[in-house]
Image (cartoon, rainbow, N blue to C red):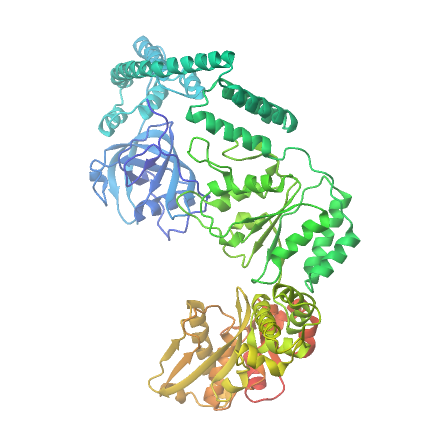
Amino acid sequence: MTPPIRLLEGEDARPETPPNADAQAPQETGVAPPLPDDAMVIVPVRNMVLFPGLVVPITIGRPSSIAAAQYAVKGAHLIGILTQLNADTQNPGTEDMAPVGTIAAILRYVTSTDGEHHIICQGQQRFRVTGNVEGYPFLVARIARIEEHSDPDDQEIEARFLRLKEVAAEVLNLLPQVPQEIVNAVQNIEVPGTLADLVAGYLDLKVQDKQALLEEVDLRTRLDRLLEAMVHRIAVLHISREIGQSTKAGLEKREREFLLREQMKAIQKELGEDGAGDVAEIDELQRLIDEAQMPQEVLKHAQKELKRLRRMSDGSSEYSMTRTYLDWLVELPWKAPQPDDIDVARARQMLEADHFGLDQVKKRILEFLAVRKLKPDGHSPILCLVGPPGVGKTSLGQSIAKAMGRQFVRVSLGGVHDEAEIRGHRRTYIGALPGNIIQALKKAGTRGCVMMLDEIDKLGTGIHGDPSAALLEVLDPEQNSSFRDNYLAVPYDLSRVLFIATANVLDPVAGPLRDRMEVLTLSGYTHEEKREIARKYLVARQMEESGLKPGQFDITDAALMVIIRDYTREAGLRNLERQIGTVCRRAAVRIVDGEAQTVHIDETDLAKVLGPARFENEVALRTALPGVATGLAWTPVGGDILFIEATRTDGSGRLILTGQLGDVMKESAQAALTLVKSRAGSLGFGPEIFEKSDLHVHIPAGAIPKDGPSAGVAMFVAMASLFLDRPVANDLAMTGEISLRGLVLPVGGIKEKVLAAMAAGVKRVMLPQRNQKDLEEVPQSARQQLEFIFLHDVEQAVRVAVTHTTP
């Protein structure tokens, strides 16, 4: 007999368990007529036979089989499992399958992440195919149920039933590591037919032999065939055991050599020639174990490993593996951490000193610290700082650790695609190590540290498992108190660790993992915020990096603003700091050359140091001609402006779209054109212009993929401007999705888009009316500098942008 197997429809059966997949509702299969009373949905399978009473998983791959299973699940129908006579037949009919099968109920329908479909079925009763039923997108056959007849007083059947129990128990005893539940299940069955089906289903027979047993209706004959097959199996198992015993005899030589080495080691110890160092090392390990304050379960395991180490020869390979394992156990921080030294007022001062702006994030951090001070034993939230590169996510984690008086340790998750990087490798592998979480705790030296999981959105998935799935236990406060690393193989308490994750975008983060974290969004900085940060932090830091002392270098606020506006265009601060570093290094060269003892940099000096401006205000230049509108876009690293260019040529009414646009943006362009055609009369031009013209819409920066619905308003305005032959206002940018009724629908990323508009020199911004509430997230300085026009329909946009009238 063999353990339960995974049975694959369309493939050979292999001893696997079903894939770890989330249960999903089956998709709609379309409308199919109801089944006749004597008909049943048929699912053909290869290389397997399902017996009544057995529960097995089946992978289905044919479209007809998938449709059949989905139809059965949707209508709560039973299905018929029939075995193919020829496994190579791709589209079998009832004539290509065995005449007798098993009626089954679908207990669960599972769709794995790789698109495979699985059903878990429970066999119920035999049936025989009596005819075909046409008109369905899957196999349907007329059937006749086969009733099981058994006389409880039949002594011959009872004798065979008892003999089958004895033989089955003997087979189970010969098999290695058989679960006791299977033995108990076999002994507790009291119905001969049920026992026969169970044994036949688990016995490793050929498919043809199993099908013959399924078709055998006479219970006495079926029991005789099973007993014959079981006796043959017992003989094979006895031979296998004899081979195993002869192999074991070959290992006794190694055991004798081990005992001789141990005796030699004891003799050398008595003579004082060798072994004293090993004994001292083991005694030192014993002392470290006693001082580590391990939990009772871990302490017992460590003592057990230490006893094994005492009995080993120091020349064996397992000695060094066990010694390394014990070193990891004693070096990990097991002691309860000291209470947090939290002073909310001091933390507020530290956050203000280290970070400019980020008011909402600072507020949430202070709330967390206050709750932690009032309830030290409470669960720590898992904070996730999300924002573009260079906005200060990592430094915020360091500030939190400093405010709490904790050690800070960082774990980089970028590019990790192996589950063992989180959970560690098992000790059976050569060079095995604990996962990054345990290694970071060893580095921190305390369980009460702040651990930053950096770049959690850059986790990958490979053939070695899914690291994001391994993080589910780590980041769950209800479970991580007994986190089990594969290398340690003992529970470790992570509940006192404060985890802080960082990400640039949340989309790549798996849903269950994202659900365990509280997201704090860090958007980009305004020009004024960048100037203040540069003046307070970046200039001083780059002066120190360049070796400049106070009084040797000075840069004006106007120069900083020029660097921000003309030499960098980013949401964060990294390129700004690089440019300031370039200016400082050039000043250091002048001081070393003796040209000056103090270098003063104004905006007029930047062209000599940094070269010509890299960015310019091209909104007015681009929108000088009809057919060009300025849109606003959201990117993972902040907002950006987007120019929508439209032109027409003689043609037949075609719409040409270029600029590497995604499907959603292409649909927005088509909707905008349809809307312009429908509003042609109210806009002031005739519909005949479309019949003789081809319209070409292009979005520059063609090497960059673009997608999303938020450019709908800008596309409509660009087309209207083209056909009206009037340019769009050059101080105006816009965003919003459109509908075919002309409504302007809300979009996301308002804060990032508004900041990008302000950075590009735009004075007015048109937003959807329903996005007005999102302006609360926009910095006050941006709200004061920009004029906002809220749109309800597209005609307002045309009046403001093209005809230059009030909305």
| Observer able to see residue 691 | yes
606 relative position to 73: left or right? right
The x and y percentages for residue 59 are 35, 40
Quadrant in the picture for the C terminus: bottom right
475 relative position to 348: left or right? left
The x and y percentages for residue 218 are 26, 19
The x and y percentages for residue 157 are 31, 12
Spot the residue most to the front. Answer: 594
Of 623 and 793, which appears nearest the observer?
Answer: 623
Q: State the residue at coordinates (49%, 55%).
A: 508
Q: Please, is residue 115 above or below residue 311 in the view?
A: below
Q: State the residue at coordinates (23%, 45%).
A: 91
Q: Please, is residue 86 above or below residue 63 in the view?
A: above
Give the image quarter of residue 442: top right
Q: Please, is residue 521 above or below residue 159 in the view?
A: below
The x and y percentages for residue 269 are 50, 14
467 relative position to 388: left or right? left
Quadrant in the picture for the N terminus: top left
